[in-house]
Amino acid sequence: MEIVYALAIGVLTGSGVWLLLRPRTFQVIIGFSLLSYAVNLFIFGMGRLAVHLPPIIATLDPDPTRFDDPVPQALVLTAIVISFATTALFLVVLLASRGLTGTDHVDGEEEPEP
């Protein structure tokens, strides 16, 4: 399970960096989103990946080493909300910039036609 989890984080990070290096602003925004998903998965994984363990304490004498850490889960939930709002703000700025300049290049200049 850890291998698949690490590969998913790697693929998201690689795709995000590749999209960040593209010249179009929409691709840059999607790259930022993929990077934020990768970071969220990484933080979530820091709470420990466990299979077949109860998410809540069911006994009177609980052993805290057997349970997942809830702090990374709370951090990831907060990060998801913040990244969604940030993506919405970036999309509004993208649309305004495209309306003002007529292009969606990150430097504002369209490539010459071959």
Image (spheres, grey):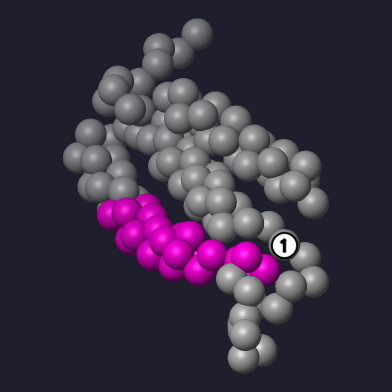
Does residue 15 appear in the picture of this structure?
Answer: no
Name, please, the residue furthest toward the top: 114
Q: Which residues are magenta?
A: 65-89
Residue 48 in the image: state x and y as whole percent: 63, 56
Question: Is 48 included in the stretch rendered in magenta?
Answer: no
> Which residue is the site of mark 1?
50
Residue 105 in the image: state x and y as whole percent: 35, 28
Residue at 56 percent of width and 58 percent of height: 47
Residue 2 in the image: state x and y as whole percent: 75, 47
Residue at 60 percent of width and 30 percent of height: 14
The main secondary structure of the magenta stretch is helix
Give 78 or 49, whichever is nearer the viewer: 49
Residue 84 in the image: state x and y as whole percent: 40, 60
In which quadrant of the rendered view does residue 112 lie? top left
Question: Is 76 included in the stretch rendered in magenta?
Answer: yes
In which quadrant of the rendered view does residue 20 lie? top left
In which quadrant of the rendered view does residue 100 lie? top left
Tell me if 35 is positioned left or right of 92 in this view. Answer: right
Tell me if 100 is positioned left or right of 36 in this view. Answer: left
Give 71 or 83, whichever is nearer the viewer: 71
Local packing at callout 1 (Cα closer than 10 Å; few below 14, some 14-19, many 20+) is some
